[in-house]
Image: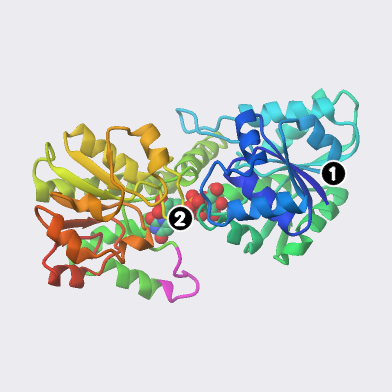
Amino acid sequence: MKISIIGSGYVGLTTGACFADIGHEVICIDNDSSKIKSLLAGNIPIYEPGLEELVQKNVKKGTLHFTESIEEGVEKSLVIFIAVPTPPLEDGSVDMTYIEKVARQIAAVLKDYRVIVDKSTVPVKTGEKVYQTIKRYNSHNSEFDVVSNPEFLREGVAIHDLLHPDRVVIGATSERAIKIMKEVYAPFKAPILITDLNSAELIKHASNSFLALKISYINALSRICEAAGANVQMVAEGMGLDHRIGKHFLKAGIGWGGSCFPKDVAAFIKISQELGYDFKLLKEVSQINSDQKEIFLRKIRDVLWVLKDKRIGLLGLAFKNNTDDVRSSVAMDLARVFLKEGAIVQAFDPKAMGKAKEVLPSIHYCSSALDVAEEADCVVIATEWEEFINLDWKSMKSKMISPIVFDGRNLLDKKRMIEMGYHYVGVGN
Ligand code: UGA
């Protein structure tokens, strides 16, 4: 199958590489010429485990190509995926200007039948608008179909999620487009759910909001556990063994972040409001999330009293492990508060320091996790990197002024840390 993907960000590039790997002929398109140049030279602009190798392998195989030209992509491919950003606006609604522009650009060069697939996360009814826009600007009056095919990959494990999806959702009504989309996904051997356009679009926002709700639920429970002297990890384990609940996304912490949940929950609240429904439950999900960070900060202030001039060792800057992404990262938010209150922040992240430096140059960036403990008044764990679990916590202690650990991800064993002589503060335990 000949496929083009417009937008070579996290979703577009990873999807392109995986499609090429399973045997499709793929063209990845981006209007950022420096990005295309670096991709052509085999350099990946993001850190995603396994992606660089996958891109290089398929470029070599001749099934993965890069270009700046939408015209070339539309001419050479039967299926055109749109994977451009849909960033949030001030009021929580979604900036649709990139999608609208791409729809016009496709329309201008459309000469034969094409399936236009929206992969970006979009408000319900976007597909209808994309259809109308292409129809309006379609100078050759060519045939086309618009399909919604939301993406459910997680950063950090994106290749696995793409190659082994729990489900593939295809929102379309045209039998011709459905047949082509089934061929695109045939090699994945995943369950395919065919829906109408609007339902497919809703599935994405509904899924992300539900996952955020699950985390906020366990975070709210963590507060009850603290008050009751219970352990949220045990409560989560006991709940998760019920297969109707499931064990995933029940890790209490400092709250969810990243480029998806905060934006998608805010957008879904706004979309529901525009459709006439006041989604109070989701508003509370969002409130619990911002409170969770504040409660964690309160715990730090309770122990350290004044943050000014304190040396805080910060472990983790990425919004989660196995990524270099610091967008809407709670770890970065914590660093901002520490710096604002006059603390010295010495931080380490295995992959995200480059991106963090661009945003927060006043952090002192350490060359190893061990170095954050140097003369530190406390260490704060803000990202769930596995390597922080296996750190030499005895050496860490010997470097610190006072051995205090605020474990915002419940990575460490509380009992063991206390035995080692640490003042340990976790979440809900
Ligand atoms: C999320 C969804 O999980 C994907 O299915 C979806 O495709 C993606 O958004 C998207 O819309 O593009 P992602 O944002 O990459 O994926 O990362 P997650 O693994 O979902 O983590 C989100 C946040 O929740 C992170 O800050 C993570 O640390 C936090 N989290 C996750 C918890 O605090 N507790 C948990 O139990 C799980």
**Depth check, front residue: 271 or 363:** 363
Element at badge 1?
loop
Check if residue 266 falls in the magenta segment: no
Rendered image: mark on residue 78: 1
Mark 2 is on which residue type? Answer: Asn
**Depth check, front residue: 130 or 308:** 308
- The image quarter containing residue 390 is bottom left
Dot 2 crowding, Cα within 10 Å, few <14, some 14–19, many 20+: many
Check the image and report above or below for 417 versus 200: below
Q: Is mark 2 within 8 Å of ligand 1?
A: no
Element at badge 2?
loop
Which stretch appears magenta? 240-248
- From the image, tell me which residue sits under label 2: 322
For the point 35% across and 53% down, the residue is 383
For the point 64% across and 40% down, the residue is 41
Mark 1 is on which residue type? Answer: Leu
Dot 1 crowding, Cα within 10 Å, few <14, some 14–19, many 20+: some
What is the chief secondary structure element of the magenta stretch?
loop
For the point 27% across and 66% down, the residue is 412
State the image coordinates of residue 88 (x, y, percent, origin top left): 50, 33
State the image coordinates of residue 282 (x, y, percent, origin top left): 44, 47
Is residue 49 toward the left or the right of residue 4 in the image?
A: left
For the point 24% across and 37% down, the residue is 337
Is residue 116 toward the left or the right of residue 209 in the image?
A: right
Residue 208 makes an appearance in the image: no
State the image coordinates of residue 426 (x, y, percent, origin top left): 23, 60
Check if residue 245 falls in the magenta segment: yes
Q: Say which of marks 1 and 2 sits in front.
A: 2
